[in-house]
Structure formats: structure tokens, C-alpha cells
Amino acid sequence: MKKGVFALVGMLVLFSLIAPMQATAAGTLMWNPSTGTVQGYKVYYGTTSGGPYPSSANAGTATSYALNNLPLKEGTTYYFVVRAYNQAGESANSNQISSSVTDSTPPAPPIGVKVN
């Protein structure tokens, strides 16, 4: 019986190392439509207030974007701006907004459990 418990714990620890959980950010960015000819919007984000914003996602013509669609890391604060675009290029940045990704990963199971 002890061998079975240790094998199960070992498999759980191995699984948690090879398949880490991805963070899920709650919330949706929303903005008012830009004026003029707009082909779409891009959401830019990074971890430094004021930029740079090295990562981006295309929101298409929608005026909202769910944060859980982005590969965000737990325990990190992100800063977001939105830009409208068309055939002439991109607009300037929107106002910046921030959001923190909370820890949603449960702890690993205890190891070394035994009966004395």
C-alpha cells in the first residue's frame, strides 16, 4: 500500500512539472470606438508602466478583449493600451490601464507522507 501512495504522489509531482497550469486573468478590456476609418484594434501589453508594450493581440473590429485570451503570468501586474488601425497605420496609444493576475494555482501535493 505504501508503494502505491508514493507512486501516486510521484506521478502527481511529475505531472505538475511537465504540465504547469496557465494563469487566467479575469476581466475584459473595453473601449469606445475610434472615429474615422477603422479596420480593427490591437491590444498592447507589458509589465512596465508607461511602456514599452512588447506583446500584442489583435482584437479585430471588436471594442473589447477578454484578458483570459492572453498568456499572462500569475502574480504579475500588466499594463495595457489599445490602438486603432487602418491601411494608413496605427493610432497613438489609448490611455493606459493596469490589471494584476492573481495566483490561481493550487499548491503541489505534500510529499514524504508516511505512517510511523
Image: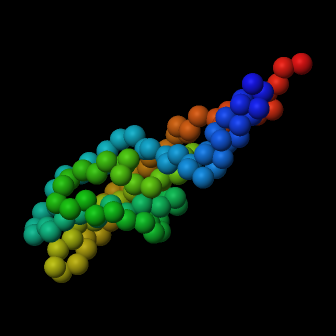
- Looking at this rendering, what residue extends furthest in the bottom direction? 88
> Please, is residue 50 above or below residue 107 in the view?
below
Seen from the viewer's position, the closer of residues 90 and 108 is 108
Tell me if residue 48 comes above or below residue 88 in the rendering.
Answer: above
Q: Is residue 68 above or below residue 41?
A: above
- Given residues 103 and 1, the one toward you in this image is 1
| Residue 27 percent coordinates (x, y) | 35, 41
Quarter assignment of residue 95: bottom left
- For the C terminus, give its image quadrant: top right
- Regarding residue 77, the answer to whether it shows in the image is no
x then y, percent, for residue 114: 82, 25
Could you tell me which residue is drawn at 31 percent across and 48 percent down? 66
Q: Is residue 32 left or right of residue 68?
A: left
Identify the coloring.
rainbow
Q: Residue 86, can we see it?
A: yes
Left or right: residue 115 compared with residue 23: right
At 39% from the left edge and 51% from the top edge, which residue is drawn? Answer: 97
Q: Position of residue 26 (x, y in %)?
A: 40, 40
Apparent side of residue 30 relative to residue 104 in the rendered image (left or right): left
Looking at the image, how many numbered discs can be counted on the residues? 0
